[in-house]
Image (tube, grey):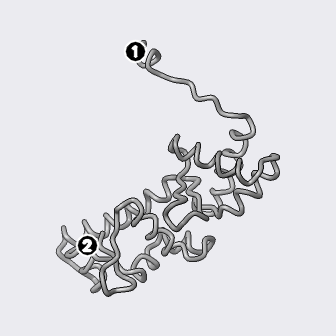
Amino acid sequence: ARKLREQAYIVKVPLKWHCFQTLIQKAALNRCGVLNMSLCKVFGHKLGMSDEEVVSAIKFFHILNSMLYYPDSGADDIVFANIHCLIDVITELMVTICKARNLNIYPNSDIKLLAMEGIVSLDFIRKMKECSSISRSIPHFVEKLLAIFQHLRIAVKVKNYEDQFFI
């Protein structure tokens, strides 16, 4: 325990940034953990933060892994205020693959294509429980999610197929 205390470090966070994080995370509870950047800016403005300061705070919390934000991914207008929602999407994909492979049962061609070849379509992801609930509050969420997956090198667009990705 003593060694852990010696290795620990203190991160100083401006009070309004801490309040901003709290507001964002509470708002995200009603929106499946994902918020539009415009809504984040509204909360920031209420605390006297400029648009630039809001983005800086979000990037800061991204570095601390308490929020996820990928401005260079093509999904720069969404913030994962609850990182577990992104993990839940990936988990749902993996559970679908593992169940199909373990039981050797493929209820439809989309699941077979995913489990056997690692190829997933936009339509399949839209139908996933986690994505469909997030899509109600975030327009074009699936496309933005796949842009993030491409940015993180989790997915690659299949050549000559507009809506298919290799995961």
Query: In the image, what residue type sits under mark 2?
Result: Gly
Quick one: label 2, few (<14), some, or many (20+) residues within 10 Å?
A: some
The numbered mark, 1 or 2, whose residue comes first in the sequence reads 1
Q: Residue at x 58, y 44 (%)?
A: 61
Q: Residue at x 70, y 34 (%)?
A: 14
Q: Which residue is mark 1?
A: 3
Judge whether 36 appears above or below 82 on screen. below
What mark, if any, has residue 118 been given in the picture?
2
The quadrant the C terminus occupies is bottom left
The quadrant the N terminus occupies is top left
Quick one: label 1, few (<14), some, or many (20+) residues within 10 Å?
A: few
Residue 106: % across, % down: 24, 80
Q: Residue furthest top?
A: 2
- Left or right: residue 1 versus residue 58 is left
Judge whether 129 appears above or below 112 on screen. above
Residue situated in front as seen by the camera: 45 or 107: 45
Q: Residue at x 42, y 80 (%)?
A: 122
- Left or right: residue 68 versus residue 114 is right
Query: In the image, what residue type sits under mark 1?
Result: Lys
Residue situated in front as seen by the camera: 87 or 13: 13
Residue 21: % across, % down: 66, 45
Q: How many marks?
A: 2
